[in-house]
Each structure stands twice: as C-alpha cells, then as structure tokens.
Image: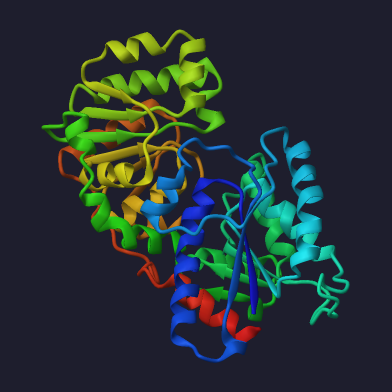
C-alpha cells in the first residue's frame, strides 16, 4: 500500500508523527510485501516556520518531507488555488493508494479537492493504476465550532463531505458527522494523534531547562494569544491584556508572544506596558518540548488555541479558553478546560477560583491513550 500524507504547517507534522511512527512499527512486524506501507510525506509549504529546522524533525522523531511544494503565504483563495495547482502533478506522478490529510488548514481542503476529482493515468513506469483516484482519509474529522466565520470551520466541513474515511478524536465528532448525513461505515472513532505525540515526548520534555532559562522559581501561569478575533483590534486586545495585568498580581505569568500578537501590541501602543510589568515574562515563541514542559508545570493556562485545550486536559492542568466556542467540547465536559469567552470579569473570576484550589479535576477522554496512530494504520491495512 502506498500512503501519501499531507502537511501544511508545523502542527500538522506533529500530528503526522504518530501515524509515521505507527507505519514504521507496522512495517517492522510484517514480512508480507503486500502488507508493507510505503509512506510519502508532502509539505505544501503553506506556512514558513523558522523553527522547522533539522533539530525539529530530529528531536521529535518526525520524518522529513519527501516533497515540498513551497507554496508560501497569501490570501485564502490564492493559497488554496496555488496548492491545488502544485499538488495535482505530484498526485498524478506518485499515484498513492491512500491520501491522508490532517486538521483544518487550507492545505487540508485544497489537497482533498484535487484528490476527489483526479483520474489516474498510467504511472511513470507505464503500469495502469490499481484505482482511479486515492482513498481520501481525514484525521481529526467531525470537529465543529459551529462558527462559519472561522475559515477552519469551512475547511473541516468541506473536507469531511468529500473524504472516504473519517477518523474521529472524540464522540462529538461522531455525532456531528452522523447529523450531517455521513454514512456510519465511513466513521472511525480512533482517538487523538496529537496525544500520541505528547505521550511519546513527555519524558524528553521534562528534561528541558526552559524553566531555568526563564528563571522560574515560584508558581506560574502560562498564556498564549493569537486568534485574529482576540488580537487584531485594540478594542478586544487591550482589555484582555489588562486582565492579564490583573491576574499577574496573584501569580507570575509567562507569555510567549506570537508574532502576529506582538506586531499588533506594538502597533496599538500596548507592548511597553506589558514589558514593564515584572510579574509578566514576555518570551519569544517556544519549541514544542519547551512549551510542553511549561504546560506540565503551570498552575493554570490561559489560551485561545485549540490544541492546548487538549494538552492541558491530558496533563490535568486547568485551562481558561478565551473563545466563545470550541470544536473540542470533550475538553470542557470531561477535561480541565473552561470555555469563558472574552468577558473580562468572568476570566478574572475563573482564574482566581483556580488559583484558590476550587477547580475541576477532569478526566482523560476515551481513546486519548497514545494509540490513535496504530488504530488508524490498522484500519487502513484492513480497508485497503
């Protein structure tokens, strides 16, 4: 079986790491040629990330991409179109049996659209294809925020609608897909590949010296802010930063600042006050292992990220999410996540409740056990 996996940004590679590891494990156990998996990884180049150096792949045991389309940034329309143009000849040349996409970035929907319409001709070696097009697999299917203003939500819905196999992280994903009329036999509840990666690298993250570098000697909270709805206008960003100033009176805060957020803080004249607060440590964006180390040791996390809601739930760390919706509701119903929105009084009240010890303990959701990648590979082998 020939499997082609698509990645558009650094988090995609971290999710693919679990699948790549499961493929290697499978190939190491089988002697049957027809059950071996040839795995090709395509990086669309949707996001250029300076932290994707050689050490990024080596430290996390992630296979380097076989093909880089080098698309770069642009508007949603321009980027999606360029990915489609550059990916089609690659797909026709490689003719994989299975094409796998993860998450909800523009690369996800762009490559899925190409694969759904492509028709294989003869291969480069002159052999006729075994099928007309690849089986399309979506990992992290069924997640819904029910906010169509989010580009990611549109990408999720469209990708799920034209995929052949849908691998789901939580029960809400199954429910959403069935409600949308997806055939039950397409849906597979396998767990969360991002948690596979977390569990695989937790011990290595514990050896990080990031806390010493940041001179952390007391309890601390961890902050991330990057969503346009929170950081792109002064009217929303300034109250949130003031709330952080208020919370910092009760606990020291570590704030690795996203480039978009730093730019906007500087543009709105809000950065200087943040830098002048000795109770808030403003840091550069961190690598995965350093950031995971900080999450594990934090008294609370304040974020608008999707993935961090999952990581804090598995690590048992209280998380305040500054969004009005989440596509990961299990982190709220079963985990340690508080979906607060941007009401400053509610954020401050929840933070003080957590710091006083009055917080929910949470539990680890079903199948978030580090075996999602293996389940996916087993199903692909059986299906193909």
Say whether residue 99 is visible.
yes
Residue occupying the far bottom of the picture: 32
> For the point 18% across and 26% down, which residue is it?
250
Say whether residue 328 is visible.
no
Classify 335 as above or below 380.
above
> For the point 47% across and 70% down, which residue is it?
373
> With 31 as the anchor, is 218 left or right in this view?
left
Image quadrant assignment for residue 70: top right
Q: Please, which colouring scheme is shown?
A: rainbow
> For the point 81% across and 64% down, which residue is it?
92
> For the point 29% across and 19% down, which residue is it?
245
Q: State the image coordinates of residue 172 (x, y, percent, origin top left).
A: 52, 64
> With 104 as the anchor, is 117 left or right in this view?
right
Rendered-image quadrant of the C terminus: bottom right
Residue occupying the far front of the picture: 125
Q: State the image coordinates of residue 62 (x, y, percent, origin top left).
A: 45, 58
Q: State the image coordinates of residue 298 (x, y, percent, origin top left).
A: 23, 41
Image quadrant assignment for residue 247: top left
Observer-nearest of 14 and 306: 14
Rendered-image quadrant of the N terminus: bottom right
Say how many tags the image has: 0
Residue occupying the far left of the picture: 217
Q: State the image coordinates of residue 267 (x, y, percent, origin top left).
A: 51, 11
Classify 173 as above or below 220.
below
Classify 17 as above or below 71.
below
């Amino acid at each position: 079986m020939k499997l082609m996996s698509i990645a558009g940004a650094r988090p995609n590679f971290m999710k693919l790491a679990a699948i790549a590891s499961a493929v290697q494990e499978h190939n190491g156990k089988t002697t049957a040629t027809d059950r071996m998996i040839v795995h090709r990884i395509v990086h669309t180049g949707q996001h250029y990330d300076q932290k994707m150096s050689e050490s990024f792949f080596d430290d996390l045991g992630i296979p380097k991409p076989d093909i880089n389309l080098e698309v770069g940034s642009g508007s949603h329309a321009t980027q999606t179109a360029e990915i489609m143009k550059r990916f089609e000849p690659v797909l026709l040349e490689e003719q994989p049996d299975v094409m796998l996409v993860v998450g909800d970035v523009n690369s996800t929907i762009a490559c899925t659209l190409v694969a759904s319409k492509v028709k294989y001709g003869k291969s480069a070696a002159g052999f006729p294809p075994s099928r007309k097009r690849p089986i399309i697999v979506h990992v992290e299917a069924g997640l819904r925020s029910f906010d169509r203003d989010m580009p990611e939500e549109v990408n999720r819905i469209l990708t799920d609608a034209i995929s052949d196999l849908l691998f789901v992280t939580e029960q809400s994903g199954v429910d959403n897909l069935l409600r949308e009329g997806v055939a039950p036999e397409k849906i597979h509840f396998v767990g969360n590949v991002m948690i596979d990666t977390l569990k695989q690298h937790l011990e290595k993250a514990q050896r990080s010296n990031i806390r010493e570098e940041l001179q952390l000697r007391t309890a601390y909270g961890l902050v991330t802010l990057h969503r346009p709805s929170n950081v792109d206008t002064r009217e929303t960003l300034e109250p949130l930063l003031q709330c952080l100033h208020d919370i910092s009176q009760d606990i020291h805060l570590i704030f690795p600042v996203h480039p978009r957020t730093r730019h906007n803080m500087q543009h709105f004249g809000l950065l200087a006050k943040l830098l002048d607060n000795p109770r808030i440590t403003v840091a550069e964006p961190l690598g995965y292992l350093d950031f995971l180390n900080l999450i594990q040791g934090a008294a609370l996390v304040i974020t608008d990220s999707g993935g961090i809601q999952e990581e804090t739930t598995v690590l048992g760390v209280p998380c305040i999410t500054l969004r009005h919706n989440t596509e990961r509701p299990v982190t709220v119903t079963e985990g340690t996540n508080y979906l607060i929105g941007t009401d400053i009084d509610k954020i401050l009240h929840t933070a003080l409740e957590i710091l006083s010890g009055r917080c929910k303990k949470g539990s680890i959701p079903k199948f978030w056990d580090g075996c999602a990648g293996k389940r996916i590979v087993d199903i692909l082998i059986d299906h193909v």
